[in-house]
Image (cartoon, rainbow, N blue to C red):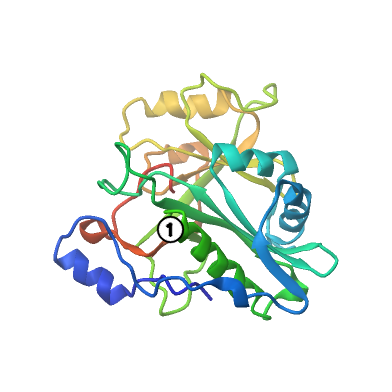
Amino acid sequence: MFWKGKVSFLKQLEYFFKQTELSLIDVNLPENPSDLIYSKCRISVSKLNDSYGIAKLLNEWFEDPESKSEAKLTPEWIRESYIQKEAIWIVAKDLGGTVRGCVCSFRIQAPYPNSLSGCGKPNVWGLVDWYCVHPLWREKGVGSALLETLDFITYRIGRKAHVFLKEGMPLALPHIPIYTTRLLCRRDGNKNIKEMREGTGLLVFPYNEIERSSGLPLVRLEGLTTNISLNDWENALDNELPECWVFVTSDSFVDYKRGWQTDSLISMYAFRWTPGKWLGSRPHSTVI
């Protein structure tokens, strides 16, 4: 399923027991994807005018039609991601030019303390997200071609280390996550507030998804790692946000009397890098 840049779990354990620092691993360097052009589907780096097709595909098919949530992206958000997140979108188009598959790499901070980037060094870190193939085009090699093309392009420009997050059941063997956590969620917010705003003291990361039944947005928050001012934080969720579902990782301090529920499992996978001594540790809050 995934590109050849995955690092075996045995090697991850080896670096962990050696207590090494976080480091890149050049394993099975990406090949030129020029042969990944199919007779009925072409894989390429997206253009700005692909934003409408990408949004349409993701809103219809990123989530299973039977799931409780659905994607809610706009072409404007996708266009903004090129600048704000230094996004690299790879698309698969049929002969008519319709987007049938996509995947994206967003620039992110390093998951763990390291000296691989910063102080004038290029940022090598990316997050793989919005991986989707139209149901009629699945099991035809399109998904693998998208990932391999993304791997080739990002590696060439210096974004060599990627993180992939999987919600729900972990990937099948031999894919082993380097970190797992459960999410906690609760419904909150003030119906008199109509949109997210600054100055609340809350660090909010929108999922660009909504609850299918109610239309309420889903957002991730940076949770508290100490119970100092826990009551003030919980009150802020109720009073400073519009109505929404908020999610935090299970190692956050919460007041379960406020209606918190245990939600899905989140697994983090590493491609072309090893966390070394940080294996199993909580990554930076902007990553998960």
Placement of 56 over or under 14, stated as above or below: above
> Left or right of 86: which side holds 192?
right
The answer to whether any part of residue 54 appears in the image is yes
| Residue found 40% across the figure and 49% down from its top | 250
The answer to whether any part of residue 261 appears in the image is no
Q: Quadrant of residue 79?
A: top right
Q: Looking at the picture, how far across and down is residue 171, in whole percent?
A: 48, 72
Furthest toward the right, the residue is 96
Mark 1, other Cα within 10 Å: few <14 / some 14–19 / many ≥20: many
| Residue found 41% across the figure and 70% down from its top | 5
| Residue found 52% across the figure and 34% down from its top | 204
* Kind of residue at disc 1: His
Q: Nearer the viewer, residue 4 or 133?
A: 4
Q: Looking at the picture, how far across and down is residue 62, in whole percent?
A: 68, 60
Q: Looking at the picture, how far across and down is residue 52, in whole percent?
A: 78, 49
What residue did someone put label 1 on? 162
Placement of 174 over or under 288, stated as above or below: below
Q: Quadrant of residue 285?
A: top left
> Left or right of 178: which side holds 67?
right
Query: Quick one: SS at disc 1?
Result: strand
> Left or right of 51: which side holds 253?
left
| Residue found 23% across the figure and 70% down from its top | 13
